[in-house]
Amino acid sequence: MDFPLVSIVIPVYNGALYIRDAIESALGQTYKNIEIIVVDDGSTDNLEETLAPYVKQKKVRYFHRENKGLSAARNTGIKESRGEYVALLDADDIFLPQKIGTQIECLKKHPECDISYCGIWHFYEDSKEKNLDLRYKYYSGDEVFPNLLKKNFINPLAVMMRSSVAKRFGFFNENFFRSEDWEYWIRLSWRGARFCFLPEKLARYRMRRAGMSYAWESEVARKRKELEIFLWLKSEMPRSARRKFNIRKVIFIHWLKLLYARFGDKLKLLRKLHSWLQQKRLVSA
């Protein structure tokens, strides 16, 4: 049987507290022909010491680089990968044992598909055993691009892609330090990459309760960057595509979201509403 190599790319910055869980979940895959690539994005904690046993036993390939952000770290891992497929795993998240094998089969059965993304569980780090379901609708094929204009429903943790994707369509934009994954999915789908949704939950995404009440300045910066995505997209589109996807309306909506974020910095009620809406989408398994 054909068992192509899969490269699991783990970017990490000061993630010594969680990195073992991520690596062990990668090592625990039922599909065994894998390589694990850890890209240390200039960490200042004891990450290197934590990784030392894995590196010594050649269970991971370790790369240290100066701090340039998540996109640059992911790109380093993708460029160093040797596999026919690339899976993305952040340092504080977890693969379920059957993830790689299931997505390999999906991509083999669907040669027209460039990128497979699956369902994922969410969990709070202070209640690790409790799985939460984020109630989103997911899309495949031609439905992906128009719906990505509305929201980002693809978590990098869910993604496995053919190694040819970056060569054909480009890498993560290293000028984006927020919403870099949304920018990438939109750019890939606009340029013709095909996404296929696999309706099985194959990974667990860690959430920190403190992160639900992050500084509102971060939200303003995020919305500003998201608006930049769609302004760029407009510049790439011919007039017919702008009309087809009503890109002016899309930009207007994202401008309103930026305005909302700016007012949220001043109004406590908006901040509370935002946090409540975030948590409302999560339901117990």
Image (spheres, rainbow, N blue to C red):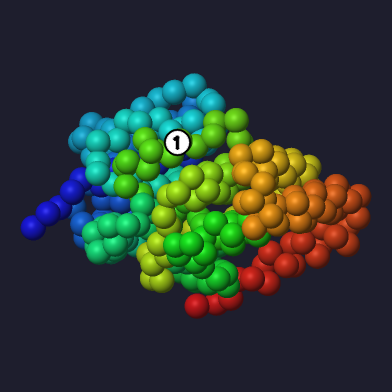
- The location of residue 30, given as percent across then percent down, is 21, 60
State how many labels appear. 1
Which image quadrant is residue 59 in? top left
Badge 1 marks a residue whose secondary structure is loop
Does 221 sit left or right of 160 as displayed?
Answer: right
Q: Is residue 123 above or below residue 80?
A: below
> Which of the two residues, 237 or 202, is positioned nearer the viewer here?
237
Residue at left 76%, top 56%? 249
- Could you tell me the amino acid type at mark 1? Gly
Residue 31 visible within the image: yes
Within 10 angstroms of label 1, few (less than 14), some, or many (20 or more) residues?
some
Q: Residue furthest left?
A: 1
Q: Is residue 11 above or below residue 94?
A: above
In which quadrant will I find the N terminus?
bottom left
- The location of residue 270, given as percent across then percent down, is 85, 60
> Which of the two residues, 65 or 236, is positioned nearer the viewer here?
236
Does 128 sit left or right of 99 as displayed?
Answer: right
Q: Is residue 49 above or below residue 129?
A: above
Residue 122 visible within the image: no
Does 42 sit left or right of 162 as displayed?
Answer: right
Residue at left 40%, top 30%? 76
Residue at left 59%, top 62%? 147
Q: Residue furthest right?
A: 266
Q: Is residue 200 above or below residue 253?
A: below
Q: Residue furthest top?
A: 66
> Which of the two residues, 141 or 75, is positioned nearer the viewer here?
141
In this figure, which residue is indicated by the disc labeled 1? 170
- The location of residue 121, given as percent across then percent down, is 47, 66
- The location of residue 65, given as percent across then percent down, is 44, 23
Which image quadrant is residue 268 in? bottom right
Residue at left 55%, top 60%? 153
